[in-house]
Image (spheres, rainbow, N blue to C red):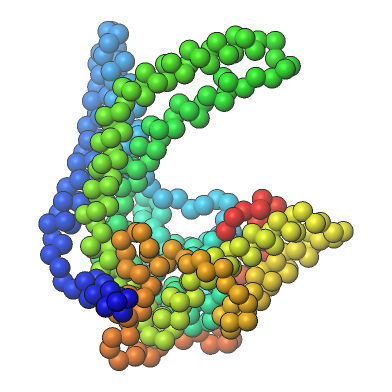
Amino acid sequence: MKVRRIAAEAKVGGARDRVGWRRAGAYAIAAVTHLLTAGLLAGGLSLVVLGWETVVQPLIGLLLLGFAALLHPRVSRLDPGLPTLRRADAPALFGLLDDIADTAGAGRLHVVQVSPGFAVRAFAYGIRRRRGLEIGLPLWLTLAPQERVAAVAHEVGHFVSGDDRRGFVVSSALGALSESAEREDGRLSSVEPLFTARSPLSRHADEMAEAARRYDVGSRAADGMLWLPKWVGRSAARLLVRLTLPGARRAEFRADAVAARVASTEAAVSALRARELAGPVSAEVQRRAVALRTFREPGVAGRADERFWAGVAVLAAELRDGAAPSDGRRDGAGQEGSGLPSSDARVARMTLGAALSAAVTLDDATAEAIEAELREPRSSLARTVVQDCVHA
C-alpha cells in the first residue's frame, strides 16, 4: 500500500496537470494585494494632505496609511546576526557555487550566510533581488562532500524550477498577507505587559491596574472592529498557498532533477535521505550548547568554538554509519503536512530512469580549502550558539 501511494504521488507530482488557471489566480490575488496597497497609500496621503483643514479626513487618511503599512510588500534581507561571506572572503567556496549555478543554468550567488539550522537554503534578498545561500552547519557537517554539491544544486535549481512562491510578485504578497494577519492578532496583546505589570516597589499599582482594565476593554473593541480585515488577509493567504501548491510540487521535482544532473543521482538521493537526521543532530547542537554554557570550565571559551562543531560532526557520522541511535524524528524535507512531495516520493521520482553521473565534483583539495574558509564563521557561530543557547 505504501509503495503504491509513493508511486502515485511521484506520478502526480511529475505529471503535466492543468495548473494554468491556478497560476493565473495566484498572480491575480497577488496583483490585487499590491494594487490595494498602492491605493491605500495614495488615498491615505491625499486625505491627510488635501483634507488637513478638516478633522475627519486626516484621521481616515491615517487609518488608510496604517492598513497600507500592514500590506506593504515584504522584501527579504540578510540576517545581520549570521556570519556572512562574500567572494573575496571565500574564493574556493564561490568557485564551487559558480560551477553549480552555471551547470544548473541559474544565476550566480552573491553572498553566503552560515547558520545553526539544519538546512541549506537559497534565497533572494533586497530590492535588486540578489541571490544568497544559507549554509546550515549541522546539515553541512552531516553531508559528504558530493552530497553538499547535491544540496546546493537542489536549492539553486529552485531559481529555474518555475516555483511561483520564489518569485517576487507572489512571495511578497504572500508574506504581506500572512504577516499582516499575525500583526493584527498581536499588535495590542504585546503591549499589555507594560500596563499589567505590578511591582511592590511601584507607588501607582492601583492606577496601573485600572489603566490595564480600561486598555483591555479598548483592545477588545478595536480587535472586534478589525475582524473583517484579519479574516480577509488569512483567507487570501490560504487561497494563495492552495493555488500555488501544484506548481510548488512540480518545482520540487524539477529541483531534484537539477541536483541529480549536477551532483549525480546517487549523491542527490543520499543528500535527501541525510535530512532525516535533523532531529538527533539538531538535538545534539542544543545539548552541547546548553552543556558548554552551563558547565563552564577555566579557559573553556577559547576551546568551545574549536570542539563544538567537531562533536556535532562526530555524532552525524555515527548516525550515518548506524552506530548511534536516532530519535526517529524526521526533517521538514519529508514535507509531511505541507502538501509537498514526501522524501520517499522524491527518491522514487529520481530513481525512475537511468542513474546520472556527476557534472560537478568536489575534490579533496577544494573541500579542504572550503573548510578553511568556513573556519572563522564556524568559530563565530559556535560562540553565538553557546552564548545564546540558540535552538538550531
Left or right, 238 with respect to 156, comes to left
User: Does residue 205 appear anywhere in the picture?
Assistant: yes
Q: Residue at x 77, y 54 (%)?
A: 294
What is the x, y in percent for residue 128? Answer: 36, 54
Q: Position of residue 76 (x, y in %)?
A: 41, 50
Q: For this view, does 167 lie left or right of residue 115?
A: left
> Residue at coordinates 53% horizontally, 16% vertically from top-left?
212
Residue 16 percent across, percent down from the top left: 16, 71
Q: Quadrant of the C terminus?
A: bottom right
Between 307 and 279, the one lying in front of the other is 279
Q: Name the image quarter holding residue 319.
A: bottom right
Spot the residue most to the front.
1
Question: Quadrant of the rendered structure where residue 153 is?
Answer: bottom left
Q: Nearer the viewer, residue 96 or 270?
A: 270
Instruction: For the N terminus, give its image quadrant.
Output: bottom left
Residue at figure coordinates x 15%, y 62% from the top left: 19
Residue 114 visible, this orientation: no
Residue 376: horizontal and vertical position, in percent? 66, 66
129 relative to 139, above or below: above
How many marks the image carries: the answer is 0
Pick the residue in front: 290 or 72: 290
Where 367 sits versus 43, above or below?
A: below
The picture quadrant where one finds residue 60 is top left
Query: Residue at the location (12% across, 64% down)?
Result: 18
Q: Is residue 205 above or below residue 241?
A: above
